[in-house]
Image: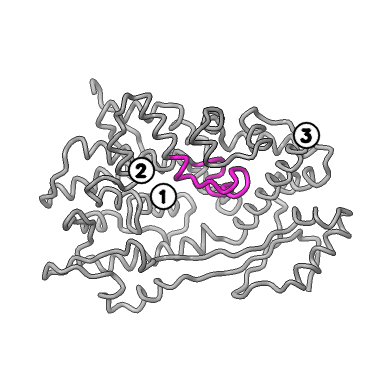
């Protein structure tokens, strides 16, 4: 590059962009869209400082990828200039497939299509535009490259994605429990037989990392008020989709109306041009602009829900360790039907129930491996004499029920 590009990041300070290709990708509209997508969806309704974006997170993850690769090189791991750049590109684009409000609408607006699949498709389009410059990045992203540790740095239980979002989300929400020692964890990385490992002396740092992740899930990502707001937004989109697909006019941007009116599958994304073209234009602003207009829509259900979200009159929420009984849910539906004078099938827009889980560390799949002083490898929980790590290996589930605050249920 003729001149080095620098971003001033509040978490790490200066982030250096060291190649023209990286800078060109950052400048592309696909990536610039991430400036308009909040990292934590509607968590700002609980944590006023949580206004950071996917753009900031992606840059941070790219920065950490470079730091980890520098450490691995210093330990004798051979990493070519092409591999170094490709790994940074892969993590830079790992979230480019996120839709509005990040994870919140993956099961409503996009009919269950996960953001990783869309990221891969958008990376493929970028690769065509850039004449195949992303070939190696795509292999790393889908784990088809011969050197497996690159994919582990992109997607595993100790990837640079998690390192950045824990530290960044802790910073912007003001929740100190997520403030992990990133510098220490990075220095402990190593590679054995093209597999990512952590040196045994870092076991306490790993325990702190996993505990931070567990606490951030309960205190931020699964905070009951955030969960309530997300369910309200999800119901708004589901109602809007039902109206749009029944030819009822809804104001909104062209990309938003397209996804409301059409039933889009992953096959559409892979075989058709229009879904990807419209998706690459869609962001939080499309939803907020539409929701403000829908507050006065002739459909009473849609307008009521939108007014509630705009005014922050969120659902009441109850969390339990066991599923809710059918009798309680049926009683709630009856009370909603009477209060809002709606048909029984339409009561589903005024409440939501389901289950959330906290998976701090999973021993199956791709567990974290420790490199012992003897040179042997051991799975983290099996080798640790720390009961906290074994406890965090258990999946904890909680069941939730949301409903309007004006309704009292037994």
Outermost residue on the top side: it is 2
Instruction: State the SS at label 1.
Output: helix
Disc 1 vs disc 3: which is toward the camera? Answer: 3
Lower sequence index among marks 3 and 2: 2
Asked if the stretch drawn in magenta spans residue 326, the answer is: no
Q: Is residue 153 above or below residue 363?
A: above
Residue 247: assigned label: 3
- Please name the residue that numbered disc 1 is placed on: 168
- Please name the residue that numbered disc 2 is placed on: 60
Would you call the spot at circle 1 few (<14 residues within 10 Å), some (14-19), or many (20 or more)? Answer: many
Q: Quarter of the image containing the N terminus?
A: top left
Asked if the stretch drawn in magenta spans residue 99, the answer is: yes
Q: Residue at x 44, y 45 (%)?
A: 116
Lower sequence index among marks 1 and 2: 2
Let me know if residue 44 appears in the view.
no
* Horizontal and vertical percent position of residue 373: 13, 69
* Horizontal and vertical percent position of residue 342: 86, 53
Let me know if residue 295 appears in the view.
yes
Q: Residue at x 35, y 68 (%)?
A: 363
Q: Is residue 273 above or below residue 363?
A: above
Q: Residue at x 76, y 55 (%)?
A: 350
Q: Residue at x 79, y 56 (%)?
A: 347
Q: From which residue to which does the magenta span run?
A: 98-119
Q: Gap in Å between the C-alphas at discs 1 and 2? A: 8 Å
Would you call the spot at circle 2 few (<14 residues within 10 Å), some (14-19), or many (20 or more)? Answer: many
Q: Is residue 348 above or below residue 409?
A: above
Disc 3 vs disc 2: which is toward the camera? Answer: 3
């Amino acid at each position: 590059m003729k001149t080095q590009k620098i971003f001033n990041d509040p978490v790490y300070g200066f982030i250096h962009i060291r190649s023209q290709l990286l800078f060109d990708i950052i400048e592309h509209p696909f990536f610039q869209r991430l400036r308009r997508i909040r990292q934590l969806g509607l968590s700002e309704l609980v944590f006023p400082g949580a206004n950071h974006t996917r753009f900031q997170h992606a840059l941070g993850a790219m920065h950490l990828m470079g730091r980890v690769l520098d450490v691995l090189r210093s330990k004798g791991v051979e990493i070519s200039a092409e591999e170094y750049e490709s790994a940074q590109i892969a993590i830079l684009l790992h979230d480019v497939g996120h839709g509005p409000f990040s994870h919140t609408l993956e099961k409503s607006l996009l009919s269950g299509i996960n953001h990783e699949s869309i990221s891969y498709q958008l990376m493929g389009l970028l690769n065509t535009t850039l004449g195949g410059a992303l070939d190696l990045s795509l292999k790393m992203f889908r784990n088809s490259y011969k050197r497996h540790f690159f994919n582990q740095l992109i997607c595993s239980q100790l990837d640079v994605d998690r390192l950045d979002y824990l530290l960044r989300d802790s910073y912007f929400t003001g929740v100190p429990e997520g403030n992990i020692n990133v510098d220490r964890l990075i220095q402990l990385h190593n590679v054995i037989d093209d597999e990512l490992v952590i040196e045994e002396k870092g076991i306490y740092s790993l325990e702190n990392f996993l505990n931070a992740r567990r606490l951030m899930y309960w205190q931020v990502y699964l905070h009951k008020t955030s969960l309530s707001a997300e369910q309200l937004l999800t119901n708004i989109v589901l109602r809007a989709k039902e109206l749009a697909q029944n030819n009822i006019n809804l104001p909104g941007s062209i990309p938003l109306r397209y996804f409301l009116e059409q039933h889009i599958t992953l096959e559409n994304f892979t075989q058709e041009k229009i879904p990807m073209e419209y998706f690459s234009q869609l962001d939080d602003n499309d939803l907020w602009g539409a929701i403000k207009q829908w507050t006065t829509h002739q459909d009473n259900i849609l307008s009521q829900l939108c007014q509630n979200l705009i005014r922050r009159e969120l659902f009441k929420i109850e969390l339990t360790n066991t599923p809710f009984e059918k009798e309680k849910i049926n009683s709630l539906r009856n009370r909603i039907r009477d209060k809002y004078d709606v048909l029984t099938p339409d009561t589903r827009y005024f409440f939501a129930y389901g289950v959330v889980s906290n998976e701090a560390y999973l021993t199956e799949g791709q567990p974290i491996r420790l490199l012992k002083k003897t040179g042997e490898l051991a799975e983290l929980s099996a080798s640790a004499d720390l009961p906290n790590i074994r406890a965090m290996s258990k999946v904890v589930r909680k069941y939730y029920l949301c409903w309007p605050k004006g309704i009292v249920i037994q």
